[in-house]
């Protein structure tokens, strides 16, 4: 891959001999990626000129929705905000970090992941119980694990699983995911009846769903 400037834009160009067409995409890190077979510079310049408006629009969207990055051993990410690791809520994390024998990045991230899982359990379980009683829907078990691409799930065995990354989103979005998964206890699909049930308990569910789709998993 080589990079070059097109006006004020950095283009990451990947040449693949087997490609029949050329493709432009915007990565989650707001980078422009151009994939082409072996073509002339004139072809590339014309392609970028033709797609420039689309590229800039998608770049703006990507920059607005980029994952939040934190400085490990200095900050934590909770409820859509970044806080100092010195805050009382991070006491357990500081304790975990203090017990590390070999301070490698991998070991530090393990401490963070364990902290987020514990924090998720402490915060989300009571919220699930609250909405479960409110909606009159009973589950069998609650599980937590780190997932990529899913905020939560509901199995046919009435087991609710929540992504430990969910604790990093806004509280209203956490409630939306909880109600969403509880609603699957009654409707194991995304039918009109399912969405009506979610809307019944969260009138702003459409707005929450739209915001959640734009939310990216945070990174270190």
Image (cartoon, rainbow, N blue to C red):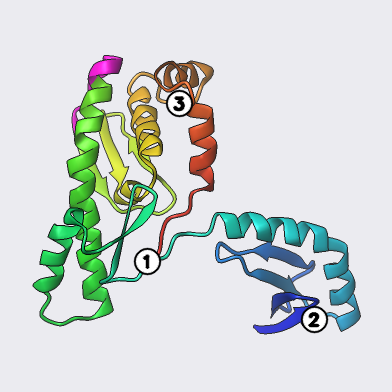
- Whether residues under marks 1 and 2 lie with C-beta atoms below 8 angstroms apart, the answer is no
Evaluate whether residue 26 shows in this view: yes
Query: How far apart are the two marked residues, 1 and 3, measured between alpha carbons?
Result: 36 Å
For the residues labelled 3 and 2, the Cα–Cα distance comes to 45 Å
Where is mark 2, residue-wise?
Answer: 38
Q: First in sequence, mark 1 or 2: give its number.
A: 2
- Marks 1 and 2, how far apart at CA: 39 Å
The residue shown at (39%, 29%) is: 180
Q: How many marks?
A: 3
Task: Give x and y (percent) for residue 76.
Answer: 29, 60
The magenta region covers 133-141
Residue 57 found in image quarter: bottom right
- Mark 1: give few (<14), some (14-19) or many (20+) Cα within 10 Å: some
User: Is residue 21 located in the magenta-colored stretch of the structure?
Assistant: no
Q: Which residue is mark 1?
A: 70
Q: Residue at x 88, y 63 (%)?
A: 50
Q: Report whether 57 appears left or right of 219.
A: right
Q: Is residue 44 left or right of residue 11?
A: right
Q: Horizontally, is 32 left or right of 65 in the view? A: right
* Displayed quadrant of residue 173: top left
**SS for dot 2:** loop
Tell me the element at label 3: loop
Secondary structure of the residue carrying tag 1 is loop
Asked if marks 3 and 2 touch (Cβ < 8 Å), the reply is: no
- Vertical placement of residue 72 versus 119, above or below: below
Q: Earlier in the sequence, mark 3 or mark 2?
A: 2
Question: Quadrant of the image for the N terminus?
Answer: bottom right
According to the picture, the residue beneath numbered tag 3 turns out to be 189
Viewer-proximal residue, 63 or 28?
63
Q: Please tell me whether mark 1 or mark 3 is closer to you in this view.
A: 1
Residue drawn at the location 27% of the way across and 35% of the way down: 160
């Amino acid at each position: 891959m080589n990079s070059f400037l097109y006006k004020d834009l950095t283009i990451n160009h990947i040449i693949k001999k087997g490609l029949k067409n050329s493709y432009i995409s915007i990565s989650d890190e707001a980078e422009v990626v151009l994939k082409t077979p072996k073509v002339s510079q004139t072809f590339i310049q014309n392609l970028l000129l033709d797609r420039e408006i689309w590229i800039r629009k998608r770049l703006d969207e990507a920059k607005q929705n980029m994952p939040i990055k934190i400085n490990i051993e200095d900050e934590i990410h909770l409820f859509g905000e970044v806080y100092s690791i010195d805050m009382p809520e991070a006491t357990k994390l500081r304790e975990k970090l203090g017990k590390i024998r070999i301070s490698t990045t991998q070991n530090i991230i393990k401490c963070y992941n364990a902290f987020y899982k514990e924090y998720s359990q402490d915060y989300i379980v009571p919220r699930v119980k609250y909405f479960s009683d409110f909606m009159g829907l009973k589950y069998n078990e609650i599980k937590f694990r780190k997932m990529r691409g899913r905020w939560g799930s509901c199995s046919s065995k009435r087991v609710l699983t929540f992504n430990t990354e969910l604790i990093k989103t806004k509280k209203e979005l956490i409630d939306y995911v909880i109600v969403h998964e509880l609603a699957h206890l009654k409707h194991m699909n995304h039918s009109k009846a399912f969405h009506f049930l979610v809307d019944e308990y969260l009138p702003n569910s459409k707005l929450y769903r739209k915001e959640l789709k734009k939310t990216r998993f945070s990174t270190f």
